[in-house]
Amino acid sequence: MTDAMRTAGGALLLDGIALRDRMIADVAREVASLSSIPCLATVLIGDDGPSQVYVRNKHRQAQLAGMTSRNERLPASATGEEAERLMRTLADDPNVSGIIVQQPVPAHLDGERLLELIPVEKDVDGLTTTSMGRLMRGIDSLVPCTPLGVLRLLQHYGAPTAGKRAVVVGRSNLVGLPLSVLLARKGVDATVTLAHSRTNDLVEVCREADILVSATGQARSIGRAHVKPGAWVVDVGISRDERGVVGDVDFDAVQSVAGAITPMPGGTGPMTVACLVANTLAAWRLQH
Ligand code: NDP
């Protein structure tokens, strides 16, 4: 770890952009030595603004890693049949290494059903029941990108995890639940509490954390009172207000008590994309 910067209050800044750029450069070196070029296919249904930005970033980083990418778009009015046909085409195409369905999909479509049409070896978001089941069972699998990115960030910056108390706020299938499994896994060895909207005394629960990860989408809801002095604080939540993108963590208040903290933006978001690209390389390897 050579790229250490500190906040004005002295916390180590967990710079997701710097680590993403390293990871992408590492993947690019490996891609250059492969017998064919991995391809990431994204499926975007409808015209949700933030989703379009996320998908653009994913293509950009895949291309920087020397991969090709396919940007499959369907209108918001697409039928389930049309969406499923597209998924099957991508699943069957030997030139496609990894497939993601950008969430959320329009309400009239069955997102779970679309996910299940992704073959496990192309499941670069790691969200199908097979990939999630493997994660739970500790069997090698493609791991969901945001949780993997959080773990990589903590490990890169040297966060002690073994025997430490980790609190994850938010229990979604996308972020909180798989992250809690990753943190508790043998080798990482944190003692994990998974908190959510029904948790009593959230402030007290959070204050026990050596590692505190918030993934709720509740803007600036994690303040100074939630943070044990010296804790590692990771912000996953993304909200938007008049000032732009805002995290779950009140950065200005927390950075002087935390031992380490992610910026928002520039922390977990870039790591999610880096892990997606790394997973696409891993998927290519599974298929060859
Ligand atoms: P979900 O809405 O699926 O889950 C949110 C979770 O937060 C739920 O478990 C919910 O509890 C919990 N929650 C909501 N309000 C509170 C509260 N006041 N106190 C405690 N827990 C609360 O969201 P996602 O997991 O999909 O996403 C979470 C956030 O992360 C969003 O802002 C999203 O935009 C962002 N995100 C960021 C990524 C990144 O790369 N940085 C990638 C993916 C998502 P309950 O289950 O009880 O309802």
Image (spheres, rainbow, N blue to C red):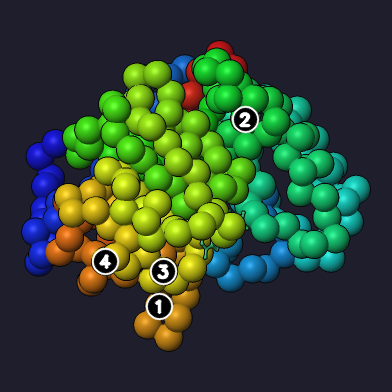
The answer for how far apart the CA atoms under marks 3 and 1 are is 16 Å
User: Do residues under tags 1 and 2 come within 8 Å of each other at their CB atoms?
Assistant: no
Tell me which residue sits at (67%, 58%) in the image: 104
Mark 3 or mark 1: name the one nearer the start of the chain.
3
Quarter of the image where ligand 1 sits: bottom right
**Local crowd size for mark 3, using a 10 Å CA cut-off: few (<14), some (14–19), many (≥20):** some
Q: Which mark is residue 244?
A: 1
Residue at the spot of label 4: 224
| Along the viewing direction, whichever of 195 and 255 lies nearer the viewer | 195
The answer for how far apart the CA atoms under marks 2 and 4 are is 34 Å
User: Do residues under tags 3 and 4 come within 8 Å of each other at their CB atoms?
Assistant: no
Q: Which mark is residue 132?
A: 2
Q: Position of residue 176 (x, y in %)?
A: 51, 45
Q: Is residue 195 left or right of residue 198?
A: left
- In the rendered structure, which amino acid carries the disc numbered 1? Gly
Residue at the spot of label 3: 221
